[in-house]
Image (cartoon, grey):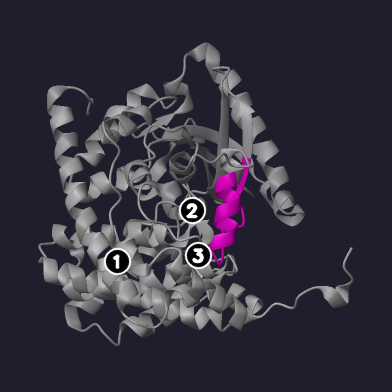
Amino acid sequence: MASMNEVPLPDAATARARGKAQRDVVARESLGEVGRRPANFDPMQLIIDQGAGRLEQLIPIRNQRMLASAFSFLRGAAVIQAHDLSHGPSSPIEVQLCGDAHLMNFGVFSSPERQLVFDVNDFDETAAGPFEWDLKRLTASFAVAAESISLGTKQQERVVRLVVAAYRQAMRRFAGETFLGLWYESPDITELQRELQQHFKGETQSRVDSAISRAKTKTADQAFAKLVEVVKGRPRIKFSPPLLVPLEEYVEPDEVAAVNGFLTELVDSYAATLSNEREALIKRFTPVDVALKVVGVGSVGTRCWIVLMLGRDVSDPFFLQVKEAGVSVIDQARGVTSAHEPGERVARGQRIMQVDPDIFLGWHTMTGLDKARHSYYVRQLYDNKASAVIDEMDFATISNYARVCGWTLARAHARSGVASEIAGYIGSSSSFEDAFVSYAIAYRDRNALDYAAFQKAAAEGRITSA
């Protein structure tokens, strides 16, 4: 066994050179290629197959949401893009990926210190993989979103270039930071507003301020007022089918007690995945009602429960979201099996990528009443969360949002400890941006074709919609 004196010392310059050498393995220009699909590849079947194991009655809602627009389709079709990425050129530099880094999966939420922060905020598909896979999904989403607000191709290209330039510049900066300095890198929303005010004026600035104000109101108290009513002196979650269905309305009367017991066991067991002081805190709350809630686009059909918890009394409400996790589309596309159960995979990935993850983020896997094994991750339902509203954007707002998202994704990737390698691979020229502009526009067009095929499948009855 080598002595400590023989262990090679870490060296940032060596790591950067190692990353630069990877250009000889996979040229940066090649990242602009959209992978060629295998013969007989059927993207619609991938969407259909994702319904297996989900709640059958909710699948039409998912399909209806994906039919709303080309961008909505892209949001729900992460599995298709992941498979496309697996058939194209990929760098050998891996990070913890978000796995579904489209622009709507970034947003504002509260840190444990109760400051509003901006970060990646959806990790259902998180997994290890080539760093550029997230960036490709992000840039494609900006191209599709920019087209949806009637921006031309030249403007779409400029927006994509801003995303990638922000990523490249931020990664080069993060490569020069210490690991601890990077880990604590967390500009709050006040700093973000100050940065954005340099670019926005008048009505555009008021849109930014409005979005941040919306985030400040999305608290547990606001959720309580919106989702809860008092029945016979007890707070109960409202019945708003099919999007919000209390437990008693969802199952047969003779099953209520069993499902209640199942969820109580899940919440109690999940608490053990928290640090000891947070486990003690969550156990002070009493679960008083449970409902099935439909969330997102791609997630619709998975089992997602919200649990109404009370602390000191009825004036101290708190919501937990218990969300089912499945196999990551990244692992599925790469033919990889995660070392962790899906719920744990999600929580671990989020803790790596987010600067300030939810203090109640945890997981649990158990056998349900259907005798099948289900894995869940658990977090707060509302914690001052808000995300972008694309229809309210113009070229100025989407351009600056692009910069913020590019910077934020770079920070999330740098937390995997390979910022120097990525910076060395990317370099300082614009060739990296050129490749992603080509990719994003090409994938915009591929997504449009897939969306048309999805509409056709719905019209022909191959898929059902609400």
Q: Which mark is residue 436?
A: 1
The reply to whether residue 314 is visible in this rendering is no
**Mark closest to the chain's N terminus, 2 or 1:** 2
Q: Which mark is residue 258?
A: none
Image position, residue 380 (x, y; %): 53, 50
How far separated are the C-alphas under marks 2 and 3?
A: 12 Å
Q: Residues within 10 Å of mark 2 (few under 14, many from 20)?
A: many
Q: Amino acid at mark 3?
A: Ser
Q: Amino acid at mark 2?
A: Ala
Q: Which mark is residue 110?
A: 3
**Mark closest to the chain's N terminus, 2 or 3:** 3
Q: Residue at x 28, y 42 (%)?
A: 37
Image position, residue 293 (x, y; %): 41, 36
How far separated are the C-alphas under marks 2 and 1?
A: 40 Å
Nearer the camera: disc 2 or disc 3: 3
Residue extending furthest toward the front: 24
The reply to whether residue 406 is visible in this rendering is yes
Q: Residue at x 30, y 38 (%)?
A: 38
Q: Residues within 10 Å of mark 3 (few under 14, many from 20)?
A: many
Residue extending furthest toward the bottom: 198
Q: Which mark is residue 220?
A: 2
Q: Amino acid at mark 1?
A: Phe
Q: Is 404 within the magenta?
A: no
Q: Which residues are magenta?
A: 345-363
Write down the quadrant of residue 265 in the picture: top right
